[in-house]
Image (tube, rainbow, N blue to C red):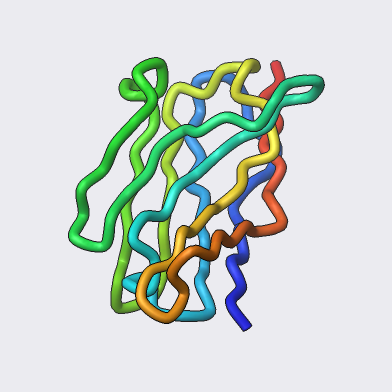
Amino acid sequence: QVQLVESGGGLAQPGGSLRLSCAASVRIVSFHVMGWYRQAPGKERELVASITPDGFADYVDSMKDRFTISKDNAKNMVYLEIDSLKPEDTAVYYCNGRGTGRLRGREYWGQGTQVTVFS
């Protein structure tokens, strides 16, 4: 059973940083792309960043400056670092994986981790 489990969310003050982690129950090379999405209260879920197994990272234009996606293939982990936190970063952050190989055509989501930025 493929699972993605996020961690690292919590309460933070504006200007601070957080690093979110996503642990995969399978090798992350089983996904042709992994990404972080977020959903703020009353808004639709939106893509933040994505990364391929060979390390190509892509960001939504508005997220390029303060967000960094990375991975550790050996640990089957994907990370999202958020710098210079703003109140508008408050959201549930989800890890996503789109399968390849035997997982081709399948999409997986974690349960989400809450990030709350407050003064």
Instruction: Name the residue located 50 percent from the left edge and 33 percent from the top edge.
Output: 47
Q: Is residue 113 left or right of residue 100?
A: right
Q: Identify the image quadrant of the C terminus.
A: top right
Q: Nearer the viewer, residue 62 or 75?
A: 62
Instruction: Name the residue located 62 percent from the left edge and 65 percent from the top edge.
Output: 5
Name the residue at the front extreme: 105
Q: Nearer the viewer, residue 109 or 105?
A: 105
Q: Quadrant of residue 78?
A: bottom left
Q: Nearer the viewer, residue 8 or 37?
A: 37
Q: Identify the image quadrant of the N terminus.
A: bottom right
Instruction: Name the residue located 58 percent from the left edge and 19 percent from the top edge.
Output: 14
Could you say where residue 55 lies in the image, as x and y percent from the top left?
Answer: 21, 54
Instruction: Name the residue located 28 percent from the left edge and 55 percent from the top edge.
Output: 52
Could you say where residue 13 lies in the image, as x and y percent from the top left?
Answer: 62, 25
Q: Is residue 73 above or below residue 111?
A: below
Could you say where residue 3 lies in the image, as x and y percent from the top left?
Answer: 61, 73
Q: Quadrant of residue 46?
A: top right
Q: Is residue 40 left or right of residue 49?
A: right
Q: Quadrant of residue 75?
A: bottom left
